[in-house]
Amino acid sequence: MVKQFEAEVVIIGAGITGTTIARELSRYKVETVVVEKSMDVGIQGQTKASGGMIYTGLVMLMSFIVKSMIAPDSPLYDPDSQKIKWLEQGFDMAPQWLEELDIKHRRLITLVIATNNEEVKALESLLKLGERIGGRYASPRWADRNACLEMEPYLTKDVIVGLFSEGDVIEVTPWELAIAQSENAKQNGVTFMLNTQVTGVSQNNGYQLVETTQGPIKTRFIVNAAGILIDKVSDMGGARDWNLTFIRNLFLVLDKRVGRLVHTNLCLPPRQGKGPICVSTLDGNLMVNTGGYMMPRDRYDLGAYPGEGLKNLIEAKKYVPEISEKDVIHTFAGMRVFNTRDPEENIIEPSSTNPRFINAAVRLPGIIPAVPIARYVVKLLGDAGLELVTKSDFNPYHKAIPRFRDLSDSERSRLIAQDSRYGHVICSCETVTEGEIVEAIKRGARTVAGVRYATRAGMGRCQGEFCSPHVVSILARELNIPVTAIMESSVGALVMPFES
Ligand SMILES: Cc1cc2nc3c(=O)[nH]c(=O)nc-3n(C[C@H](O)[C@H](O)[C@H](O)COP(=O)(O)OP(=O)(O)OC[C@H]3O[C@@H](n4cnc5c(N)ncnc54)[C@H](O)[C@@H]3O)c2cc1C
């Protein structure tokens, strides 16, 4: 007999949107289940491929300019639009959010450079736009050639001038946020059903039945946060008056050897789909993003085409000449999602035929506004009849797995004295210890990819060539299942990211 589960609210999708809603809902006495088709949280959708920038000010100004190129008839900046309100609130809420969840982050300087007269003019327009809007958008200042080279000593000597602003970009590792939120939501009573795909939704005597690959879930409310598959899940639940369009973005990850070459969020003035050049990541790699927007073949078009990465690298070398093709250790594509009803807005609303089925179709950027959007979804659930009684024992705090690589010698010694497995390095590229891997498994990692994203084991120069077999055997040992089962699920997790 198929087991039937029950919950007051079912959230579909455990990316940044689903996990933030789950955490916000866990402040209340509500029985919540999150259903995710992947075996691990936050590592299969857009969240995994995100640039991980929480920004306002100068970077947001650049996105207004890009928008004016794509949609010349809509206002450049509309302070009353829901999207802008959520983005500004989200940026302001970020410090507390990251603090509570113990998320590694840092503030960055954004430097937008000009290497020809046309780009100088573009910088002037950017500055004027910022002054016209005022407030947080009036932060950019000029940096002359010397100041640019002082900020970025490895920058091309062709730089003429730059615009910079300080502190209005917070860099995070995006999937860490989703993982931390799922752990915090679990601490506060939310159930996560992983490796569970939603296949249908039906109505039954005032209840809804969410059909999944692990059996049906009887529920009163559904929140659809299925990312690039949100239209498909929405169709299962009833009427949908919008479609999705997709834009593909290719990123190159460069070895830590060259991380020192860039210190700022280094950008060119916005052109259609272009702006960023590269940025060093929190863990010291360089991330190159010179490819601009590309129309994908379809929403599953996430691989790199032959030569595509190299073309982007050659473009980046024009600005940071010391980087080389030998430094590329990983290439991946991300899929940006827009709805056709109003590509400028998010669709966060109940389905027109079913007030208890809420769609959370987030357009980019989706990490910045995640908390205000989640709070709005909770309000919509309340409006639709969900009783929201606050929990007196809600705990907003989450503790990250110790990052051995970031600790001082004395902190390392203390950790090893508590648990000798922290003295056994498994991934030598990223200095990840057995203790961290075991802790990630205790917290829910189930595949090699899950361990990789939770700890960085396998994210270094060799891309897991040396440590993967060790990670497989630790997974098998800790979960008490055969090595072959781990290999099967790990391969599945890596090769079927968006199977619908
Ligand atoms: C290249 C790129 C760069 C970006 N850069 C930034 C940035 O710098 N800053 C920023 O704020 N935003 C950025 N974004 C946008 C941001 O990453 C997304 O808006 C956000 O991650 C969307 O999260 P989500 O949870 O809605 O979707 P996803 O992360 O895609 O999560 C959806 C989840 O639903 C699951 N799912 C789907 N169908 C089913 C089903 N039938 N059953 C069960 N589970 C299902 C999927 O497996 C997935 O885990 C970027 C996006 C891209 C692509």
Image (tube, rainbow, N blue to C red):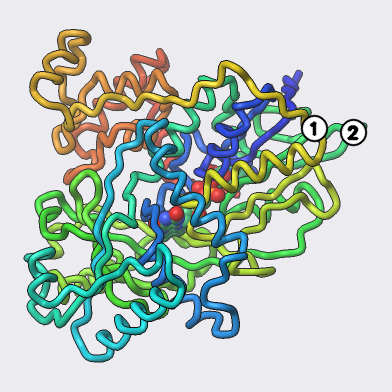
Residue 254 seen from this side:
yes
Q: Are marks 1 and 2 in contact (CB under 8 Å)?
A: yes
Horizontal and vertical percent position of residue 218: 78, 28
Ligand 1 lies under 8 Å from the Cβ of mark 2:
no
Q: Above or below — where is 465 with respect to 135?
A: above
> Given the current orientation, which residue lies at the most extreme bottom position?
117
Q: Name the residue under label 1.
A: 220
Q: Mark 2 points at which residue?
A: 206
Q: How crowded is mark 1: few (under 14 residues within 10 Å), some or many (20 or more)?
A: some
> Given the current orientation, which residue lies at the most extreme right position?
205
- Tell me which residue sits at (37%, 81%) in the image: 128
Residue 46 seen from this side:
no
Camera-side residue of 72 and 362 = 72
Secondary structure under tag 2 reads: loop
Task: Name the image quarter holding the N terminus.
Answer: top right
Identify the image quadrant of residue 488: top left
Compared across the picture, whether 418 is left or right of 72 comes to: left
Camera-side residue of 25 and 211 = 25
Compared across the picture, whether 431 is left or right of 195 comes to: left
- Which residue type does callout 2 highlight? Gly
Q: Which label was assigned to residue 381?
A: none
- Tell me which residue sits at (75%, 53%) in the image: 235
Q: Above or below — where is 127 with respect to 393?
A: below
Compared across the picture, whether 394 is left or right of 169 comes to: right
- Tell me which residue sits at (14%, 57%) in the image: 327
Secondary structure under tag 1 reads: strand
The CA span between labels 1 and 2 is: 7 Å
